[in-house]
Amino acid sequence: TQLLEQSPQFLSIQEGENLTVYCNSSSVFSSLQWYRQEPGEGPVLLVTVVTGGEVKKLKRLTFQFGDARKDSSLHITAAQTGDTGLYLCVVGNAGNMLTFGGGTRLMVKP
Amino acid sequence: GAVVSQHPSWVICKSGTSVKIECRSLDFQATTMFWYRQFPKQSLMLMATSNEGSKATYEQGVEKDKFLINHASLTLSTLTVTSAHPEDSSFYICSGVGQGISLSNQPQHFGDGTRLSIL
């Protein structure tokens, strides 16, 4: 069974600060997706990464896929209150199995 | 982007009632739909995977007779919580995935969830 750990589990910061969230797997995966979920809503896809070492940017969000395809990070620059939410990483393997991380709950205070 | 509509958004009912939740893909054909359960401040827990026209595959520990899933068309899947009890109270979310070779490379399009409260 593939284990997927996200850290930190909870993060509370002031608006304008930078932060990094990590997603680490016990085994190699074929793809990784990051989602953000706001309270009372379903998760929304932010990015999909499939190539080891890949870096993708989405405005103030930078996503990195580890060279060994076992980890990923999400970095937010100058966080805003609108970034508040639950961030989920989801990995897929060759067997078409999807595994969810435990989530990182981010609160950005004004 | 692709839209998944989930209804109802909130249900409050008495213990023993059966509750049906609908998940519709509005602008794409969802060959695979997932049903999740989410407890407060926790991540999503996969309950079952359903492919159109076939029986759902349930995760370990999920009672298939308790949580009935029907995926009769490429745009509709339903989850029925039979004889619901207070411990079934939770946030239930569905997602749909379109056609493609690899499931793991495709985005999941989530509904907005259904909050189920059993009294």
Image (cartoon, rainbow, N blue to C red):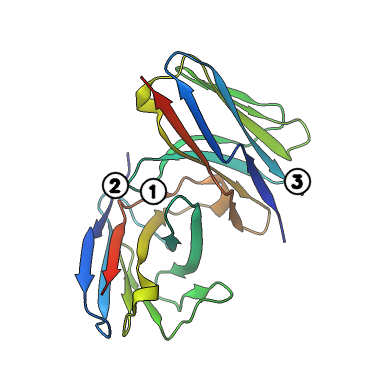
> What mark, if any, has residue A28 been given in the picture?
3
The chain identifier of the residue carrying mark 3 reads A
Q: Tell me what residue is drawn at x 27 percent, y 49 percent.
A: B27
A37 to A16, vertically: above or below: below
On-image quarter of the C terminus of chain B = bottom left
Name the spot of residue B72 as percent of width and height, x first: 32, 74
A3 to A84, vertically: above or below: below
* Helix, strand or loop under label 1: strand
> What mark, if any, has residue B3 been given in the picture?
2
* Helix, strand or loop under label 3: loop
Determine the CA span between mark 3 and mark 1. 24 Å
In-image side of A9 versus B4 (left or right): right
| Label 2, residues with CA under 10 Å away: few <14, some 14-19, many ≥20 | some
**Residue contact at pointers 3 and 1, CB within 8 angstroms:** no
The chain identifier of the residue carrying mark 2 reads B
| Label 1, residues with CA under 10 Å away: few <14, some 14-19, many ≥20 | many
Residue type beneath disc 1:
His
Residue at label 1? B109
- Are discs 3 and 1 both within one chain? no
Residue type beneath disc 2:
Val
A48 to B33, vertically: above or below: above
**Residue contact at pointers 1 and 2, CB within 8 angstroms:** yes
Name the spot of residue A31 as percent of width and height, x first: 63, 42
**Residue B102 in view here:** no
**Residue B66 in view here:** yes
Task: Give whichever of B7, B75 is nearer the camera.
Answer: B7
In-image side of A69 versus B17 (left or right): right
B30 to A69, vertically: above or below: below
Task: Give whichever of B106, A12 is nearer the camera.
Answer: A12
- Are discs 2 and 3 both within one chain? no
Task: Give whichever of A61, B3 is nearer the camera.
Answer: A61
Q: Tell me what residue is drawn at x 43 percent, y 58 percent.
A: B38
